[in-house]
Image (cartoon, rainbow, N blue to C red):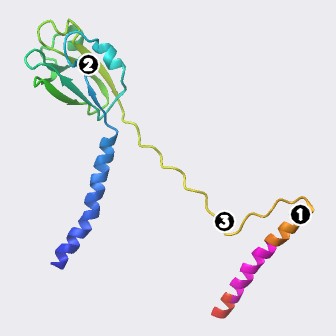
Amino acid sequence: MAAKAASLSSTAPAAALLLLLAAAGLAGATEYTVGDSEGWTIGPSYLAWSQKYNFTAGDTLVFNYVQRQHDVFRVTQDAFQTCDPANKTMQRWASGHDVVELAAPGIYYFICNVSGHCLGGMKFSVAVGEPLPPPSPPPPPPRASLFPPPPPVGSGAASLTRRRWMQALVMPVSCLGLIIGMLI
């Protein structure tokens, strides 16, 4: 029983670390609703919509639309330009609420394949960049000195202060010598 408890207690920190790392990786991802409040439908300018944002790897696109009235095809650049996805479709969705992960940097092309919709403007592309690196940790605080810095040389008051500083330095050194002498 003790061995089992020890085994569990030694894996708990590792599990906690993995959860923390997973959460940190997801912290930078953003979810974008295609077309914002209008969704994926005929009418909005998806070119203008896609240019409002900076997409990075790990972000997701959410396509909201009326099922069977629209669909979502991820296609090649050629299929995007011609609105003809024949043999150039990379992925297809048709649920009415599709979540698409932008997993890697690159250019992604999306169209609606319902007859006439792509030619009517239901298409857009997004350039996906590398995720931003985590912020650098702040620099460590300056180390406190055991002794204050000596006062600047100058007026007579400064030399009096300097003398006190030297006395403050000599006293701990003398005490340290006594302690070492007692130990020997």
Question: Where's residue 37, x and y in %?
Answer: 25, 21
In the displayed orientation, state which residue is furthest to the right: 156
CA distance separating discs 2 and 3: 59 Å
Does 179 appear in magenta?
Answer: no
User: Which callout, 1 or 3, points at the residue further toward the start of the chain?
Assistant: 3
Q: Amino acid at mark 2?
A: Gly
Q: Secondary structure at mark 3?
A: loop
- Mark 1 = which residue? 157
**Among the two numbered marks 2 and 1 on one chain, the one whose residue lies closer to the N terminus:** 2
- Nearer to us of marks 1 and 3 is 1
Of the numbered discs in the image, which one, if any, rests on residue 35? 2
Instruction: Say the numbered circle drawn on residue 145.
Output: 3
What type is the residue that disc 3 sits on?
Ser
Q: Nearer the viewer, residue 163 or 107?
A: 163
Q: Is 58 placed above or below 177 here?
A: above
Name which residue lies at 20% across and 6% down: 119
Callout 1 amino acid: Ala
Q: Nearer the viewer, residue 59 or 39?
A: 39
